[in-house]
Each structure stands twice: as C-alpha cells, then as structure tokens.
Image (cartoon, rainbow, N blue to C red):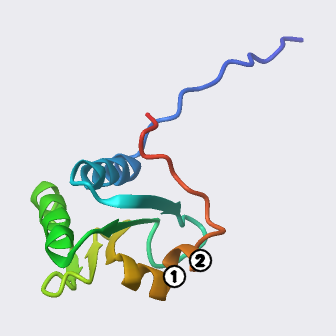
Amino acid sequence: MSKKSSETVPTEISPTIELVRYLAKSIDEKKGHDIVIFDLRGISPITDYFVICTGLSDIHNRTIAESLIEYEEAVHVEGIESGNWILLDYTDVIVHIFMEETRQFYGLSRLWGDAPQVDYDSD
C-alpha cells in the first residue's frame, strides 16, 4: 500500500485577485488611506471583492479614480463628478473611494466586516 505525498500543490493566483492587489497598491501609491479589501466570494451575489479607501479631498478622490481607470477601464463609474463617493465597477471587483465623512456615514466596513479581508501586499 503506497502512502500519498503530503506535498503542497502551488495554487494559481487568479487574474481577479491580481487586479484587486494592483488596484489597492495603486490607491496606496496615490496616497489613499485606510485601504480595506473584502473577499465577498460566496457571500454576495453582487461582486467578488470590495476595495474601500478614503481620500483627502474630492480632487484627490478623482485623481485616484482616474489613475485606476487609466490602468483598467471600469464597466461602470459613479460619482466621479462630485468626488465624495466614487464607485468603480470592474464586475468582479468594486472600488469605493470615499471622503472620510461619507465613508463613516454609509459604513460599508461595518456592513461587510464579517467578510474575510485580503492583504494587498501578499504575493
């Protein structure tokens, strides 16, 4: 009787998680703060991941959003005119760029706080 190997099979990184990490790192490079990534797979029928961050001003938020759109065109964009809450919909990933007060008011981190979080610095 042969014994099965206990070797770990390397897992392939999905294009979606690569996009999530790229978007979060780009936000960080543009000085967005309080970046949180929620893994919503199996929890939400809307999307697989939320990337949530806060900018310092409406202009700052628009700058962050425009830099993300330059890299990857979003399927749908909301709020870029006002900059108070910008939503970039990439189908499997939705990015929320908030002003601090708006982020606190809508409380997406509280609503989705039980979902696993993803570290965007991991490989």
Give the SS element for disc 2: helix
Q: Which quadrant does the N terminus fall into?
A: top right
Camera-side residue of 104 and 12: 104
Image quarter of the C terminus = top left
Task: Report if the CB atoms under discs 2 and 1 are less than 8 Å apart.
Answer: yes
Assess disc 1: are there few (<14), some (14-19) or many (≥20) residues with their C-alpha within 10 Å of its C-alpha: few
Residue at point 51%, 63% (across, down): 38
Up the image or down, 101 lies above or below 92; here it is below
Q: Quadrant of residue 86?
A: bottom left
Residue 40 position within the rendered picture, expressed as x and y whole percent measured from the top left: 54, 67
Residue that mark 1 sits on: 107
Query: Mark 2 belongs to which amino acid?
Result: Arg
Q: Amino acid at mark 1?
A: Gly
Alpha-carbon neighbours of circle 2 within 10 Å: few (<14), some, or many (≥20)?
Answer: few
Residue assigned mark 2: 110
Q: Quadrant of residue 53?
A: bottom left
Relative placement, left or right, of 114 versus 112 is right
Res. 56 mark: none
Percent position (x, y) of residue 99? Answer: 32, 77
Out of 49 and 102, give the one closest to the viewer. Answer: 102
83 up-or-down from 26: above or below: below
